[in-house]
Amino acid sequence: MTQTKQTTQKPAYNVWQNVRFMIGHAWHSCKSVLWLCLAVVGVSLGLNLAQLFIAPMVLARVEQHAPLPQLLGTIGFFALVLAILSGLQGYLKENTMYGRVGVRLSIINAISEKACTTSYPNTRDPVTLKLLEKARYACRSNSRPAEHIWETLTQLLLNLAGFSVYLALVSGLNFGLVLAVAATTAVGFFVSRRINEWGYRHREAEATYQKQIQYVRDKAESIHLAKDIRIFGLGSWVEDLYNSALRLYAAFVNRREKIYTRACAVDAVLTLARNSIAYFYLIRLTLAEGLPASQFLLYFSAFSSFSTWVTGILQQATTLRQESLDLSSIQEYLHLPEPFRFEGGQPIPQSDAYELRLDHVSFRYPGTDRLILRDIDLIIRPGEKIAVVGLNGAGKTTLVKILCGFYDPDEGRVLLNGTDIREFNRQDYYRLFSTVFQESSILDITVAETVAQAVENIDMDRVKDCIAKAGLTEKIESLPQGYGAHIGKNIYLDGIEFSGGQTQRLMLARALYKNGPFLVLDEPTAALDPIAENDIYQKYNEMTTGKSSVFISHRLASTRFCDRILFLKDGVIAEEGTHDQLLAQGGGYAKLFDIQARYYQEGRDLDEIQL
Amino acid sequence: MKSSSEKITLKETMQIHFRAYRDLRPYCPGAFASTAAYAAVNALGPYVTVYLSSQLINELAGARRPEILWPLVGLTLAVGAGLVLLTGALLHWKKAMTDRYEQAKEKIYTDKMLSLDYADVDKAETHDLLSQIRQNERWASWGFLMLLDAFGEMVGGAVGVLGAIVLTVSLFTLPVPSSAGQLTLLNHPLFVLLLVAALAGVTFLSPLCLNQGNKYWASLSEDAKFSNRFFRAFGFLGDEKETNLDIRMYNQQKISIPCLKHNFLFNTDGIVARTARGPMGGWMALGYSLSAVLTGLVYVFVCLKAWAGAFGVGSVTQYVGAVTALSTSVSTLVERVGILKSNTTFMRTIYQFLDIPNQMYQGSLTTEKRSDRQYEVEFRDVSFKYPGSSVWALRHVNMKFKVGERMAVVGENGSSKTTFIKLLCRLYDPQEGQILLNGIDIRKYNYRDYMNLFSVVFQDFQLLAQPLGANVAGAQTYDRAKVRQALEDAGFGDRLAKMPQGLDTMLYKEFATDGVDVSGGEAQKIAIARTLYKDAPFLILDEPTAALDPIAEAEIYSKFNEIAGDKTAVYISHRLSSCKFCDEIAVFDHGQIVQQGSHDRLLADEGGKYYALWMAQAQYYTAPAAQEA
């Protein structure tokens, strides 16, 4: 389906641009990578020539019955050269990897940097995500282009050098023969490539099979499914799925290799042709001109190797072209255009009273038709506490995302003290917000580092204060390593895994430490038990002192701590006011409140609820 | 279990790899056979070529008879082409089998994971062990991949040794003619021994050096593991969609990238690279040059004999080729044994995982699926700690409940509500006390049988990217009418009607591009349908509503209460609203049941935990509190 599209699509960067990109990267992060490539080429070529000449040269001495010292001298010389060059080769082989890994890491970090800072809508755009996936894939292991390209370039260079040297060696003999060898080799190569491209053409199918196996494996081994597997006896179902995924993959692989075997047949025929020509010519020549056997050996070896160089060049060029496609995705991703402003712009006004305004904002998610927010007009005054309530899908989280500058509205503006936020550097704008979202990103660092979101210059008093405000002091101080305890077990095996509720409190502490003029909380108590939840509400005033705040919640109990409640319905602010005002209005808010209240009021039963 | 520091003997190396070979063969029959076949032919091929071309050169260096020369050329050409074809075909057979092996061998771990006691699956150590195994493999193919690779190399090496010996015998048996004077000394058997000794020396030394170099890898493996963990944790920040808001708000790349750079070991200034520039590289260099020294020695001996007239010039190429090949083959064998020895450390890790025993006692009593569904469960002074923890998760829990009841389990976060359920469903066994079903310790029942009594919707329930119906039934083939009914009852009927292929509609996109994504609430309904399909006497709902809005929440509760029918339903929740209609409420606090009874009775105790929990929420909904605020 998409396969044909991909192969015909022209990459944004060509081979030269990609090679230049890599060399540039290496030049800046690790020059030795380049020198080592050249050294490997030099040593390998030397070794190859020594191996080519040793047999004919020594044989010639034996054939001529040269004096013994001369024979031994020749052997000694070649043995020494071989020993030095092989030693060097072994040494280089052991040392080429590190710089290359270093360069790859620096590319990986560049991609991470871009992924972490690119305009938020890019992180949700399927095309961009696909690009990121490709860029990541290109860096995934030592054998992927971001590292393997050095091997490809080394080999290409080596084959070109070998080709030139051998050409000089054999072309004096008979140029027609050189052409014949080169031609059969090239034909063989292109026919094989045509056949072997089957795998390339079907790589998406292969990836799908592998992904499916991976999916079943991940699920079967996951701690989450483990309970379901045992309770519901899903073991044999999972096993069936696993086996059938393996069977599909096996059938694919068998088919591929069967097709590849055809290439071997072509190869055999062409080898036969090439060797026939070479033998026929060289033996005729040897017989006619009375060349010594050692000379025949030299020429024959040279011709065989010559064909190897030709294949090598063609092969490496093909590899380079393929790798260039992957490298192109890296460059494309790194040079992704940014709809948000990240450079220059106006400085954020220094003030202790920020007013945020949504000026007739309408918004739909990119690539969709549904209007999520329509014509929202809202002013958040300095120090005001706003609650946003509504059913799932009413647009609460979207509203917050627009306020925080994660999306720009399709119509209307977001104004900070009267200035359109598009005028500011977006990263500076983000500094104004302390946020707790429903989904968080928690790194494997210590508790203190998590609260401070920094690894140095941490104000420990402030950390402790914020942890206390979030009600987590008891838990943290009970840990053997206290604030220095690592979070998560991905790196440190003795790391701490916090429960959902504890994590939410930690996130709250983090937001408080950041101390931005806007506090934004999206369902910060969903995972908390009633007492803990109430505890947070009670502290809410203290936490928000001197800040403006926006609080999203399903639990209407929380809303009365706010100065103003916005009841969202179908993307508009349907009702607005204090808790009592809204109850008095008897609208959607009052109805929602009633449903929740029924549980808690005596003498009312669930049966009453009319949905 | 052998610790990783224990000395590795050759015996253990052979035993553990042979065991692995036996364990893996059923997972991918043909992988070892194809590898062996290819290795053998690939090792023999060059000898045939060397032999034929040496005959050719001998003829060219000698009489140059066309009637010998041309047929010889023909034979060489035919054999050459034949070998290309045969080797190629075998290579592709091997390639297919190796690719399959790479995937299939992973199943041995999955199978183990599926058969483990839940207590072991739930342990971080178990998962860490498995991810260590996979890291080792990704890092340098250590483990099962190395086994197959080494197996091929060793078969090739062994065949190579045999072939080389066949081609070399005449080197020693053909004497230098007496006309050669002093050089007839070369005929002396001692000389032969000397050469063999030198050959053996170099042949063994070279791989020893290489192994010496490789040893550094094994010794660095701990550091490498740590570094790789950093890489996995910090190398891909920004890839997960869910994390992107937070990352931007807190500029997290400014933490992750420097941390990664700082802790990454494989840079040019890391310890591994320094070792490579120093001793590791040195050993490698030495190992490689030694083989060149051997080539020199062989040339000297062979050429001296040829020079003295023992055999023709062509045979020089044959002998030099064969002896160097002999040395290479022996080196390969020695080197692979060394590698397998290094691999043993990693195989120990693999078997440490595969040998985790099943410790849960499995009784044989049947639960006698009673038509009256009269079951009574009792916790009798039950105490439980998670393995490796020193804190009691449950302490002296006593309680009793009967089929047909509605029970709610409430309490603060961390009060072990879910632990209680895990014990009830025998995912764990308690350390003290007993859990009784109809008066008999649940350990005495057949495990599968006992499991059949329970249907649980866990908080983190999972659906697979498979057809809707299969997800409900937990099997590929199922009773369609029953599945349909279960979905109806779970409130999924309307949505089912909209599914493009009904019960056969694929959920999610992993297995079908036209798969259907369901929302969290819909997924929950499917999970509930699964419990209905199972039709077990106990239904358990573990905190299902955290992500739902009030209306969806109310819907789930009233629905569930209705569909539980005559079954026992247990709810875990920290939204107390779910408790009111339950006959029995158990209040957990710090691993103990502090209160038990009906809603009204518990609420009457104003000093109790339940009252505190209830009021924390209810104060905002009852009229006086509302005014107060």
Image (cartoon, coloured by chain):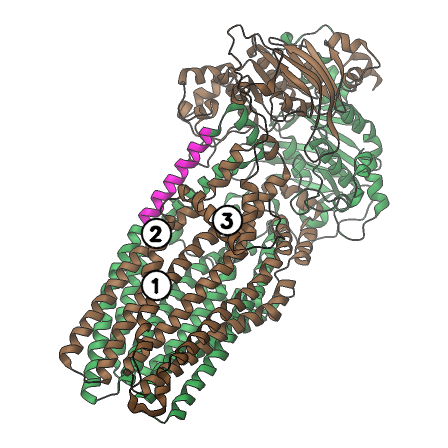
Chain colours: A green, B brown
Q: Secondary structure at mark 1?
A: helix
Q: Position of residue A347 (x, y in %)?
A: 74, 52
Which is more N-terminal, label 1 or label 2? 2
Farthest residue toward the left?
A: B67
Mark 3: give few (<14), some (14-19) or many (20+) Cα within 10 Å.
some
Check the residue under mark 2 and report the chain it is in.
Answer: B
Check the residue under mark 1 and report the chain it is in.
Answer: B
State the mark number for residue B34. 2
Q: What is the tally of numbered marks visible in this picture?
A: 3
Q: Are marks 3 and 1 in contact (CB under 8 Å)?
A: no
Q: Amino acid at mark 1?
A: Ala
Is residue A100 visible to us here? no
Which span of residues is magenta-colored?
A236-256
| Residue under the image location 52 percent in, 33 percent down | B114
| Residue under the image location 37 percent in, 84 percent down | B186
Residue B542 vs A211, above or below: the answer is above
Left or right: residue A487 versus residue B1 is: right
Query: Which residue bears the numbered disc 1?
Result: B43
Left or right: residue A203 versus residue B581 is: left
Mark 2: give few (<14), some (14-19) or many (20+) Cα within 10 Å.
many
Query: Which residue bears the numbered disc 3?
Result: B16
Label 2 to label 3: alpha-carbon separation: 22 Å
Q: Quadrant of residue A570?
A: top right
Q: Secondary structure at mark 2?
A: helix
